[in-house]
Image (spheres, rainbow, N blue to C red):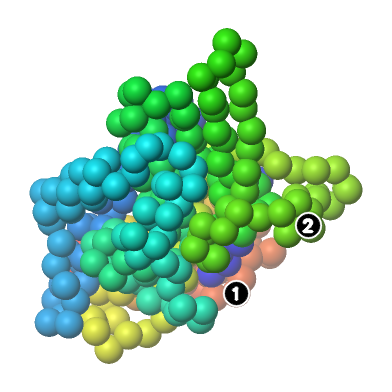
Amino acid sequence: MPHSFEKFLTGRSGTLAAAWDHAAASAPWSTLMKEWIVLTVAIRNTLRCSPGSPSADRESLEKRLAFLRWDLEARVQPLTIDNHIRTFFTDLGFRPAPKGYNEPDGSLLDSVLSRREGAGSALTILFAWATETVSKMSTESHTKISVEFVKNAPAQIVRLRISDTSNDAPEERAEYISAEKNGQKLESSDWIDWCQSGNGKTALERLSVSDVWIRLVLELRAALEKPSSRWPESAGLRAQVLLLDQLIALRPSLIRLFADRAMLRHRIGDSTGALDDLKRFFAFQDRESAAPALVSLYDLLRLTPRQPVP
């Protein structure tokens, strides 16, 4: 099951992704946080059959975010980029997960808030939301800060756009920071390599909100694929199906996703769902060029009476 973020970037966005990006334009990271809360609760509820898996509910997560918003407002005074970075990474202690850490907790909001650490996309999304929050709260400040995620850049790198309206002619500048290095600002020599595209031209295009969300979902999916003793295998498979539902809604043109979901559905006993996904897959994919395992499963399911989902 491939997880290449670049493949998802080249896939044509679905109607849902386009509508989401349009609706989120004025407050992109607040919109994404709402989706992250819903996804965290859904994944936790799917995995909760194990005593070792903590539970989560939407109301408690919203309250925790509200408290963090209040804490940020109290600490970031006055609003400058240095004060904000220090508050988030030093005073509040948010940090990247250790290298090699590949657990779902690193991408689920409840754990990121509790442990004050997260995987690459998770930590930078929370930082982006925090930046959007303090910038809007500081109504008397002449400084406005926004966060952008950039194509070709690693998940832990973000671009900050700082606007100073204290003068008649507003001044704007851009800086890059690394969440992996606790908000350290990058010099041009640090990012010149990854801002070059294959044809040698700079590629500093901003990622859409749906693209950033896809990257988080891919990180979470990769972590859930690893066997765990904390929940039954079937629970992990069902959680992966939830993530594929998200990816298919945002990138329906990536037909391989339907094959991936079919295999997962078959493993949890959902033969009807698996067959429906394979019908969609083979409507666009020749049997001769498809993986033999997919062809065999498709033929088997077509000959098997439909069963209700367990």
Return the mark for residue 57. none
How many angstroms separate mark 1 from mark 2 (CA)?
A: 47 Å
Q: Tag 2: residue type?
A: Ser
User: Which x, y percent locates residue 26?
Assistant: 41, 25
| Residue sitting at x 46%, y 39% | 80
Residues at circles 1 and 2 in contact by the CB criterion of under 8 Å: no
**In the image, what residue occupies the spot 24% across and 67% down?**
114
State the residue in front, 60 or 78: 78
- Residue under circle 2? 189
State which mark lies toward you, 1 or 2. Answer: 2
Residue drawn where x is 33% and y is 24% of the image: 139
Q: Is residue 236 above or below residue 144?
A: below
Q: Position of residue 285 (x, y in %)?
A: 62, 54
Q: Nearer the viewer, residue 297 or 32?
A: 32
Badge 1 density bin: few <14, some 14–19, many ≥20, Cα 10 Å = few
Q: Is residue 104 above or below residue 130?
A: below
On screen, residue 13 above or below 67: above
Crowding at dot 2, Cα within 10 Å, few <14 / some 14-19 / many 20+, comes out as few
Camera-nearest residue between 204 and 247: 204
The residue beneath circle 1 is: 292
Where is residue 150 drawn, in percent x and y?
Answer: 62, 45
The quarter in which the C terminus is drawn is bottom left
Residue 248 in sight in this render: no
Q: Secondary structure at mark 2?
A: helix
Instruction: Compare marks 1 and 2 and give the one earlier in the sequence.
Output: 2
Q: Secondary structure at mark 1?
A: helix
Single out the residue that lies furthest toward the top.
Answer: 168
